[in-house]
Image: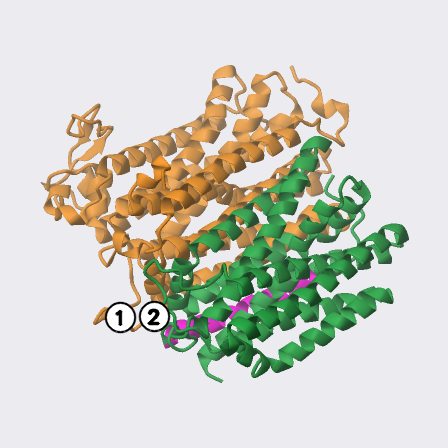
Chain colours: A orange, B green
Amino acid sequence: MSLPIATVSHLTAGRSQIGTSLSFHLFFAVLGVGLPVMMLAAEGMHLRTGDPVWRALARRWSKVFAVLFAVGAASGTIISFELGLLFPRFMAYAGGIIGLPFSLEGAAFFIEAIFVGIYLYGWNRLSPRAHWLSGIPIAISAVASAFFIVTANAWMNVPRGFQIVHGRVTHVDPLAAMFNPAWATETSHMVLGAYLATTFGVASVYAVGMLRGRRDSYHRKAIVLALSMAAILAPLQLAVGDLLGRTVANHQPATLAAIEGVTHTERGAGLNIGGFPLPGHNGDVLNVKVPHLLSVLAFDNPNTPVRGLNTFPKADRTPLAPYVRLAFIGMVGIGTGLVALGLWYWLRRRRGTHGPEDRLTLMALAAAGPAAFLANEFGWLVSELGRQPWIVYGVFRTSSGITTAPGLGVTFTAFTLLYVGLTALTLWAVRRITARPVQGLPTTALAVAK
Amino acid sequence: MSLPAVIALALGLSLTSYAVLAGADFGAGALDLLSGKRCSDRKAIAETIGPLWEANHVWLIFSITILFSAFPAAFSALGTALLAPFTVALLAIVLRSAALGLRSSPGAQTRSQVMLGRLFGLASIVAPFAFGTVAGGLAVASVQGVPIGHGTPAIPWTGLFALLVGALAVALCAQLAATFVSLNLYRSGEDLITERFRRRALCSGVCVLTLSVAALATSAATTPALWHRLIGAGLPALITGSLAMVLSLLALAGRWYGVARVLTMLSGAAVLWGWFVAQSPRLVGTRLTIHTAAATHPALIAIAISIAIVLLLVLPATYLLFALFGRPVLEVIE
C-alpha cells in the first residue's frame, strides 16, 4: 500500500481509529444525554405557564436533537463493531466478563430510539401532556445508556469480578465486574459532564445570538434555563471529580502519577497547579506547588507518600504522560472556570429575572460552551491515555488486544475521512435549522428588549 | 435446551427482527434511488419509515451485544476475518443514517435533498449487500475446515455464493420496502402511486425468487456439504421460504397488500433461518460452535436475564410505536 498512512504502525493505527471514533461519538453522546432534559424542561415550562416562547425553544431543540441522535446512533454502532474489528483479542477476553452492562445498554438504547420516534413525530399526534410524558423515557434511557457504558470503562480502569487461571478467564461474576470500585464516581462524573456541556453549550449558542443584538425574551429564556441547571451542577461536578481522583489514587497509582505530574515519589506530596509538561522542561512551567495538598486530596492524610512515575517499570507507565497531564490540567481548569462563571451569573442576576447581559459576560458564556465540550474530551483522554499501556489496568495490555488482520492504515484513513465529512454535514444541517426564523411566536416575544 | 442454545435462539430472533424491520428501511433507500424525480414517491417512502427506522436499527446493536457477551470467541473471530466487509457495511450504515437524519431536517433545500437522497440510496444498497456476503461466506466457511485467523481470508465472503446471497439480501430489502409502502399508500387511498410501488414489489419479488434459486444451485455445484445441510436440517425453512416467496408474488398480483407484507416478512425470515439451521451449532468456521465459543456460565445467565429485561421493556414500547405510526403519518417533522 503506497498510502503514507499505511506506514503508521499497526497498533497506532488501530488505537487512533478507535480514539477518533470515541471522541467523535462523545460529542453526540453528551448532547444525547443533555438535550432531552433541556427539551423536557422547556416544554414543561410551556405546559405550566402557557408561554409560547418555551414551546418554540423545545421544538427547535427537538429538531436539532433529531439530527444529532441520527448521527450519534450511527457513530455508536461504529464503536460496537470496532471493539471486535480492531480489538478482537481484547473482546474475546473481556466480552464474557463485561457483557452485562453492554446488553443492558442495548435495552436502554432501544427505549430511547422508540421514544425518540414517538416524541419527534408526535408533536401533533399526541396531547401536549402525553407528548411531554413521551420525552421522559428518552431522558432516562439516555442517562442509563451512559451509565452502562461507563461502568464498562470503569471496569477497564479497575477490573474486578473474574480470575485468570492458566491464561483462561474463570470465576466470572458479572455483577462484581459491573459494580467495580470505580463505577459510582466514573458514571456520575460522565453524566454530570454531559449535562454541563449541554447546558453551557445551549447558553453559549444564545449568548452569541445576544451578542449579535437579538436581546429578546426567546434568547433570554434559553440562557436562564440553561444556567439555572448549570450553576447547580458545576460545583457538584468538582466534588465528584475529587472523589474520582481518590478512586484513581487507590486503584491506578501509575495513572495518578501521570495526571498529577508526580515524577518522583514524595512523602506528603504537594499539588501541582499549572506545571505544564512542555518539552525540555521538567513539568515546571508556570507551576505553583501547594505543599501536602495532593496527599490530602488523594489519601486524606498530609503525609501519605504518593508514588512517582519513575518507580514504575518503563513498560508499565503511560508513554503519553505529558499529554495525560495536559488533558487533566485542561479539564480541571475549564471545570473551575465554569463553576466561577455560573456563580458570577447568579450572584449578579437581577432579582427574579435574569443575570448580567453585558458584553463581557456574554462573551464568557459564548466561550463556555465549546470549553465544556473540550473538558469532556479531555476527561476521556485522561481516562484512556492515563490507563496505557493497559487496555485493562494491570491485567491486559493494549498491544495484546489489537487485531491480527492487516489493513488498519486503510480503515483508519477511511473512517477519518468519514468523520470529517459527517462533521461538515452535521454542522450544515444544524445551521440550516437554526438559520430559520422562529415560528409560532407573537412578535412581542421577539421584540428587542431595552 | 442448553443455556447457550437459548441465547443463540434469542440472537437468531434478534437478527431476524433486524433483517425484516431494518431490511425494509434499507430497501426504502434503494427505492428512493429508483424514484428519480418523483417527489410523491419519495415522500411516501419517507413517511413509511420516518419514525420507525431508528428503533429498527437498534436490533443490530442488540444482536452485536448478545454476540460479544455470550459468544466472545466467535465475535473475536468474526472481527478478525471479516474486517473488510464489516468496515464497508459500517461506513454504509453511518452514511445512510446521517443522510436520512439530515435530509428530514427542516430547511434542507431541494438540491441538497437530492444529493442526500442519492447518498441514502447508495448506502442502503451497499449495507445489506455487505451483510449478505458475510452471511453467505459464513455459511460456506461452516462446512469447510479452513482454519480461522492469522491473516488468511478464511471466510469466503467474495465467493460466488456469498455474492449471490448479498444480491438476494438487497432484493429482499427492496421487496419488503415496496410492500410496506404499497400497503401504507393503499390504506391512505393513493391508488396511482400504490400501483407504482406494487410493480416495484413484484419486480423485486421476482428477483428474490431468481436469486434464491441461483444461490441454491451454486451451493449444490460448489459446496455440496452446504447444500446437503440446506436440504437436510434446513428443509422446513427452505419450503416455508419458497412458498412464502411465491405466495407473496400472488398476493401482490391480487392486491392483497396486508397479506403480501406478512408473506414477504416470512420469506425473509425463512431465508435467514435456513442459514441458521444449516450451520447450527457452528458459529464461525467448523470449530467455533455455540458451545465452544460460549462465555462462562455466570456470564451466560447474566446475558439471559438482560435479554429478558430487554424483551419486557422493548416489546410493549415497540407495540406503542407501531400502533402510533405503523399507519400513514401525514406530517413529516416540519
Instruction: Mark 1 vs mark 2: tell me if same chain.
Output: yes
Check residue B43 for magenta coloring: no
Asked whether residue B308 is drawn in magenta, I would say yes
Instruction: State which tag comes first along the sequence, 1 or 2.
Output: 1
Q: Residue at x 75, y 44 (%)?
A: B332
Q: How many neighbours does mark 1 have within 10 angstroms: few (below 14), some (14-19), or many (20 or more)? A: few
Quarter residue A50 falls in? top right
Along the viewing direction, whichever of A344 and A177 lies nearer the viewer:
A177
Q: Secondary structure at mark 2?
A: loop
The front one of B51 and A47 is: B51
Q: Residue at x 15, y 42 (%)?
A: A309
Circle 2 Cα neighbour tier, 10 Å, few/some/many (<14 / 14–19 / ≥20) = many
Helix, strand or loop under label 1: strand
- Residue topped by disc 1: A168
Kindly indicate whether the residue at mark 2 contacts the one at mark 1 (C-beta within 8 angstroms). Answer: no
For the residue pair B125 and B60, the one nearer the viewer reads as B125
Residue A151 in view (yes/no): no
Q: Is residue A107 above or below residue A6?
A: below
- Please identify the quadrant where the C terminus of chain A is shown: top right
Residue at mark 2: A173
Find residue B230 and report its horizontal and vertical position in percent.
57, 78
Query: Residue at 48% across / 20% down in the picture?
Result: A363
- In the image, which is nearer the foreground, mark 1 or mark 2? 1
Magenta region, mostly helix, strand or loop? Answer: helix
Stretch in magenta:
B297-320
The amino acid sitting under disc 2 is Asp
